[in-house]
Image (cartoon, rainbow, N blue to C red):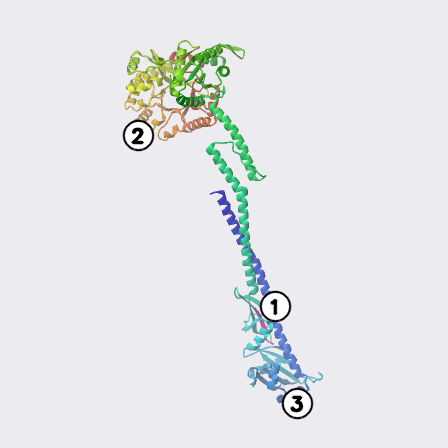
Amino acid sequence: MSMKKKILIFMSILFLLSFLVLYFMIRLLILNTFETIEKKDMTRSLDTVLFNVNQTEEDMKKNLINFTIWDDTYHFAKFENPDYIKINLTDDAYSFNQFNLVAITNAQGSLLYGASFDLKKGEKQPFPPDFLPLISQIGSVNAGIVMIKNKPMMVVSEPIIKSDETGPSDGVMIVGRWIDQEEVSILAKKSQSELSIVPIKSHQQGKWIQIDSENTISGYSAVSDVYGNPAFVFRVKSERTTYATGRKSIILFSVFMGVLMLFSFYIIHTFMDKAVLSRINELVATIRDIKTRRDFSKRLPAKGKDEVSRMIQEFNQMMISLEYYEGMIRHQAFYDSLTDLPNRLQFYEKLNEMIEVAKIDYAAFYVLFVDLDKFKEVNDTYGHDAGDLLLQHVAEVLKQLVPNDALISRLGGDEYTILLSGNITETEVKILLHRVLIRLNEPFVVDENTLHISASIGLSVYPKDGETAEDLVKHADQAMYSVKKSGRNNYAVFEHQTTAPISVEALRKALINGEFFLLYQPRVEVSTGVLRSAEVLIRWEHPDQGVLLPEAFLPVVEESGLMAELGERVLLSACSQIMIWKKSVEPELKVSIAVPDILLHREQFVKSVKTVLTKSGLSARDLVFEVTAHLFEPTKTAYKNLVHLKQLGVNIGIREVEKGDLLMVDVATFSLDYVKISPTLIDQMHKGMDSVTVKTLIDWCRVQRITSIAEGVETQSQRDRLLKYGCDMMQGPIVEKPVSPEKFVEWWKKTST
């Protein structure tokens, strides 16, 4: 998931949660506040109703006083004048004063007059008998509520006195008004509220508020009668306008906040996209472009002092470092670390380029192969440091003498190559070679030691001596070896007769005449230098062409069907020689033989190995077969032979291992003994990735408990690096070149003392 999506999801969740929390907090706080306001308003409404009830009682009292301080009423109470009733308590008097009941008692409390009046019908009604027992008690209070047949009535009483408000009271006059629906409506109108009377329960008293629903609220006030008993409850019902307004406000506020949050979300997202994400995407796109084009010169503008700008600044610094180190690595990839000359890789690259150009221009050019004579003696006598200085000296001599447009390279060890364009003639080339030989013959002083060196040089010409890089180098190399054979310190031009096609008949004669011979290259422990095995290398002493390397004749041997015979002879000779050395040189010595693929595909090969071991007396555990990685396919006959050889006790190793070769081997089912790392990787080990590859191979061997061998080790720095990586064994010029059995023993005696 991209960072943009993550930020969008995170911000969406954050804003949604914030909105919900804010909404519920506002709803909780504000609605509670509005509810409190509503309750306060309802309490005021209840107070208004009760005030209006009291006001009604006061109005009744005022009307009553008009009667009680009147002399006519006083005389009636005292003398019971019947005309008083007819004249003063008429129907109009009842209607005018809104009296539903009038009662008059004398000083002794006896009822003198009592009547009930229906204000709606406008006529008198029978006096309610339930009221009689209440008269004496009502007379003792000014006003209150009485319940008559569960119907509430407001009653007011006043003592009857003279109009001058003097004298003792001669009785009490009581008036009453039903609190019916009409009276409730009047009170509601005065209170400006929806008022009703509901039955009271015994436990209810005082005032209380009740939320009926989202839309209505009710206030209740318990009313007691003149005796203090619960009488009824006033209920004030009201629309929740305040609450609704609050709820509407919350919704509007929530919508506003939602829009504000969405706008904020858009602003923040736009800012993040522009200030962070777009710059990061630009950085990612630049990195991908760098990965594709491998162009470390790319830079990004770093504006501001924020974290992204600092990251871009660090990226630019990293690119500067990578560009620098890429230049170094490129230089290391194409140049020799000791002499700073172009290396093998650049040499072959340039050679192939020259061949392609020459094919178009039909031009000729020259390949020179230079090999120092007796260079190993310098290393052995004066040390590797002196040898390195000599190699650098030779490089400087060649740079001084060879034309500027030529390519001088060091292939490895004491071997140099020179590519000369066809702008000079072959005669000029020979003059140049004479000058090189003369300069190299001059004494060279190292640490007060005077060294003398010479060189053998071979020359091949394109296209006369070959049209491929391999042929040109091989023929120049063969010409150089012809110089070595004829006494060194000279040069030779490749002659085609030296590489006449090898016939099957010549091979047969070579087998009969014993022209094939074996050389042995010591293999030692990297850490101690102790001899552990010897690799067998075959050569052919050709009567006309001199010493031939395996690549010159083995293809013909394979095609001729003579490989089995030659292979068995080599194996028997090597095993017999190792048996001799195990007794005189090193008891733990093993023999290592690179077995051609064609032999391992023969079903009789294992039987031949058993025969050779029996004849030579060598134990199978002292024999090492080096094979190629592609043979490890279970369906092949070669793989089955390898399994049988392992069961026999023969050690199996893979030769010239490079990147990816070990992927073909299933170490879980086939137990390898050795892995020999390609000399190409060893030669380029000072470079970044090749060094990593070598270390990875060695680490893999250590984990799998397989012996690691480095082939082609030439310098002390290579040995030091292999020692650091934990490589088990090594072979190459730093130890000894392939030598005859006699020289092998001489080397062993020299190194073991």
Q: Residues within 10 Å of mark 3 (few under 14, many from 20)?
A: few
The answer to whether mark 1 and mark 2 are in CB contact below 8 A is: no
- Tag 2 residue: 635
Kindly identify which numbered label has been placed on residue 79: 3
Q: Position of residue 127 (x, y in %)?
A: 57, 84
Q: Quadrant of residue 220?
A: bottom right
The answer to whether mark 1 and mark 3 are in CB contact below 8 A is: no
- Tag 1 residue: 44
| Distance from Cα at disc 1 to Cα at disc 3 | 49 Å
Select label 3 or label 2 by which is in front: 2
Q: What span is in magenta?
A: 219-226
Q: Position of residue 649 (x, y in %)?
A: 34, 23
Side of 466 where 263 appears, left or right: right
Select label 1 or label 3 by which is in front: 1
Q: Is residue 222 magenta?
A: yes
Q: Quadrant of residue 183?
A: bottom right
Q: Amino acid at mark 3?
A: Phe
